[in-house]
Amino acid sequence: MPPAAETVPVPSRGTRTVGDPPGRASGEPPGGPRSRTARARRSVRLRAAALAALLTCLVFCLGGALAGSLPFGATTRNTVDLGQQYLPFHAYWRRLLLGEAEGDLFLNWSSGFGSNFLGDYGTYLSSPFDLMVVLFPAARIELALYVITAAKITAAGAAMAVLLLRLRRGPWPVAAVLGTAYALCGWTLNFAATVPMWLDGLLAFPLLCLVGEWARAGRRPVLGPLVVALAWYANFYTAYMATVGAAVVLAVRLLTADDTGRRRLAGLLRAARGVLVGMGLATPLVLVIFMATRVADPTPEVTFTPVTWTEVFARLLPATASVASPALFIGTPALALALTLPFNRVLAPRVRIAWTAAICLVALSMQWGPTHLLWHAGASPNGIPYRQSFVLCGLLLIAAWLSTARGLPRPPALLGAGTLLAAAAFAARGSVVIDRWTYPVFGAALAAAALAAAAVLAARRYGVGARVLPALAVGLLVLAQAGETAITGGRVERQQLRKVSWAPPLGPWHTDMARATEAANAWPRYRTDPGEVPGGNDVLLVGGQGADYYSSLTADVSSRTLASLGFGSYAKGRHPVSLDNPVTDAIFSIGTRMRSAPTGPVRTDRPPRAAISSTDTPVPPLVTVHDDEGPAPSGPDRASSSRTDPTGGDASADGVSAFARQESLLGADVYDEPAAVRRAGPSGTEEGRLTLTATCPAGSQLWFWAPRHRGTAALAGHPPVAFAGKLPSVLAPVRPLGTVPPSGAVRIEVRAAPGTPALPSRPVGCLVPDRLATAVRHLTATGATAVRATGHSLTAELPAGSTGTAVVAVPRISGWRCAAGDAELAPARSRGGLIAVPLDGTATSIHCSFRPPGLRGGGAIGAVALVCLLAIGFRHRFLGRTRRVHPECTSASSDRN
């Protein structure tokens, strides 16, 4: 072992001094043997990365072709959140990058009547790969997202191939195949291919493992933190999991290295320093996301329940799909190689023990509640509970490489691996996720792998075909891995389309609505709401400014304010949708409302068409003035821990209906709410039938508010209207039932599904159009005379002498600051959940500006981290460059390692 001393009196050949560039020793000419060796290794890694990238891209595309999905077939890929969140966000990101959006990086004026876009950017769009959207036309945004997805997966395969060769020298084609196996593991095919921002974590894991290797060797002290920063910036959520996984790899490498305790400790400290500085550099964005999460609409708490080990073993097999169990498929040949590691006596015992223990402990940690929370940053997620599965897949493939880098393991190791593989396949036979293709594909891949092993063993034992047979073996390995993975990808896509919700392909409905909305757009004079189009996040796809907004960071105050006014929502409140109601149109200054309906059935394999119409209605301006002497609004004024229920029913804290809340924000009485609604039949809807009778002004519009109701409601003489409430996921919007007859007598027949909660105490509101028209004229006369909106600010000119409160038709989410006249900006007040600015009669204008919470604090931390990085770089460049190369700087790990 080399001495621990950091200096030598006289530099000699093979010793690097302060002036030497990395990779070349003092006294060695630029073209010396060591330099040539380093170039040869870089060339090998480059070839492995290129082959892994090519194989990954081809196999991923082949899986899509087998499934018949876009862009290789006609079937939509827009399942669940891919169609409702990620596709619309990428469409909006393209418009923003090209200067076509109304907002900027701080604020999105289009969604949710004004939302924090920097948080959404950090959650969905901060990957450098997402910049590729500008290379595609607006009509091909689906293709753009597919290319971005394929590019991330391809890069992950290349990065893993490079990591494997960095861990140990070996046959680069095998490293390329294993890199492909990692990039196209079950986690990718089943989870992340439709959640593209998670794929940045797939790429981050091998990159962070490389950072650990650099830290061990004392190399690249500046590049390492930059890689960490990029990983956390691209997607901090899966980067956190990748960091935990890389820490496991580093710990095993340190424990199994032929190093002194001092070198191990130094490597560990360098790695910790790099991670902390890198995280600090990413903090300006990460802290914004964290602060937005704190004020986001909370989802119900989830208690983690591990799946049975039968399901875990089943997910090692091909063509299995489930969001409830860990997706651990890496390909049968790769899994077989990984299982040889405990039996491979070519490796040192400590290496076999350490890696086997690490893999087993990580697998167990996925099944235990406390470590499950550790993997998911302290919060059990809604939906997929095994989001860290890609780390275990990566560890298995590292094990496969370490066991085969020096050649195919010997027959005893292969026999041991075959026994474990057969036992796992047998244990999985009763799993609910087993597909009809699972065992046939598994058997075919295993047979091809066995033929490949036989070819190598024959060449080794008999010395025949020394070149042909190993090449044949690699070809069989590629065929087995690629074929099995492509079939798995195709089957998983087809299963997902059958089991989950989907949106149709983008087509004429979306493009026609986008053109119509653009033609009608008059922002900020008033809003144009495109209504509902297939998918979700409609305004991000087709333009306009509406309530529709689906994000993990939907502000609690936004969702509660809209719910209290009768808006419907999905995703447990995080997806409020458009409401076609004249009172809320007046409150939020929606002057043009688009409506559309499909002209035929909406299918998975055909872009839909629709008939589109628009209605222009006089509405008040975006900023109105209200008299403080009126009744105080009863809606939620701020997000707080003391949550009240705005959805009616027995849980309502104040018993105020959506109609009364609308009137409070409008500042006028426009509804007649029957004081007493007589109910015939059961007191609730447990029996499924209920009749309501009341008296309303003749000719008024009858509206029904029952956000929890699942069933129908019908005004006598009118067709039934459906309500789809389903707690805790769905709230039904307030809906019109028809016009009150001349007699004023109202009879409503209610039908409810079993288990539907009781109706609110005041479910009926009768809107008098003349009263609403009078209120709109008054608010227009006293409201803003001019409104200007820039990227993240708004200015309104007011009539002279205005007193009371100026109400901006924007939810008062955290980050808004406002002032009247020339006063200093201060945190905005709230009126009924909207922005409010007090007026004393002297100011003739108001100004509001939005700054994402956490940006200033995150920027300060980022600046400190940048100073630290510069200091590290200066020290490395001028003061502290090591004078002796660590053994692992010039070669891969010792073969005993």
Image (cartoon, helix red, strand yellow):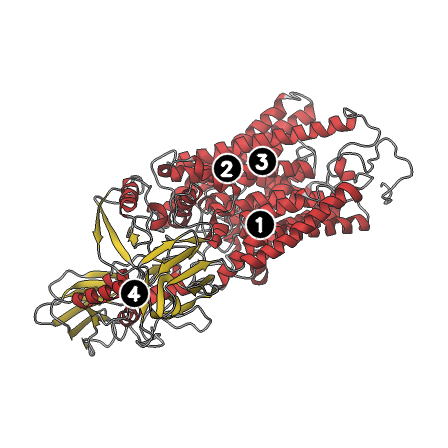
Q: Secondary structure at mark 4?
A: loop
Distance between the alpha carbons at the discs numbered 1 and 3: 20 Å
Name the amino acid type tagged 2: Ala
Horizontal placement of 239 versus 485: left or right?
Answer: right
Earlier sequence position, callout 2 versus callout 4: 2
Earlier sequence position, callout 1 versus callout 3: 3
Q: Disc number at residue 151?
A: 2
Q: Is residue 809 above or below residue 387?
A: below
Q: Disc number at residue 158?
A: 3
Q: Is residue 895 visible?
A: no
Q: Secondary structure at mark 3?
A: helix
Distance between the alpha carbons at the discs numbered 1 and 4: 39 Å
**Pointers 1 and 4 in contact (CB under 8 A)?**
no
Q: Which residue is mark 4?
A: 566
- The mark lying in front, picked from 2 and 4, is 4
- The mark lying in front, picked from 4 and 3, is 4
Earlier sequence position, callout 3 versus callout 2: 2
Name the amino acid type tagged 1: Trp
Earlier sequence position, callout 1 versus callout 4: 1
Earlier sequence position, callout 4 versus callout 3: 3
Q: Dot 4: few (<14), some (14–19), or many (≥20) neighbours within 10 Å?
A: many
Q: Disc number at residue 232?
A: 1
Place of residue 578 in the rendered image (x, y in percent of width and height, measured from the top left): 30, 57
